[in-house]
Image (cartoon, rainbow, N blue to C red):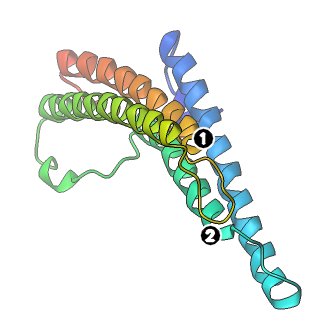
Amino acid sequence: MSDAALAGRRGFAALVAALVTGWALIGGLVLVAVIAMNVVSVVGGVVWKPFAGDFEMTQVGVAVAVFAFLPWCQLTRANVSADIFTMRASPRWVARLGLVASAVALVFAALLLWRMSQGMADQRAYGSTTTILQFPVWIAFVPVLVSLALLALASLVTLFEDARAARRGADG
């Protein structure tokens, strides 16, 4: 488990942190598999014959990996932020801004989860496949939807933590 994700969390928040950390590790394994596949494809292209459909599998694998990292970034507060605007702000204002950011992340995650689930349904209904491998596109949406559900849960956890911090008047 990641100390950053579990730090001071108990109960539901610790469960979400464990799920998010495990999912991010799976995303890392997917990325390593994509890299290995590309190495085999490049070497195969020089020595034997290139790996058919490597570009399609790279697209799917990288997309899945990127989405797998989003919940962990939210939970560990590793997202991009502009600290220059809050350098002179009081801890209470920083906590309030964190609360707003977590609320926006929750709305964003819920909206993406809804729209991506609709996109998956459309891709499945239309029978869309990749050009070379004929891989059903909708299957790639499944891990993305899991990632977005975990992002929503991670955003909910940080929202409650930020609300508590805003009430206390401290950043945390």
* Residue 107 visible here: yes
Q: Which mark is residue 139?
A: 1
Q: Which residue is mark 2?
A: 55
- Residue at 55%, 31% in the rendered image: 20
Please identify the quadrant where the N terminus is shown: top right
Badge 2 element: helix
**Crowd band around label 2 with a 10 angstrom C-alpha radius: few (<14), some (14–19), many (20+):** some
Please state which amino acid type lies under the numbered disc 1: Ile
What residue is at 51 percent from the left and 51 percent from the top? 66
Position above or below: 166 against 147: above
In what quadrant of the picture does the C terminus appear? Answer: top left
- Residue farthest front in this picture: 126
**Residue 112 image point, x, y percent:** 34, 36
Checking the image for residue 5, the label placed there is none
> Looking at the picture, does residue 12 appear above or below residue 30?
above
Label total for image: 2
Q: Position of residue 27 (x, y in %)?
A: 62, 46
Give the farthest residue toward the right. Answer: 48
- Res 2 seen here: no
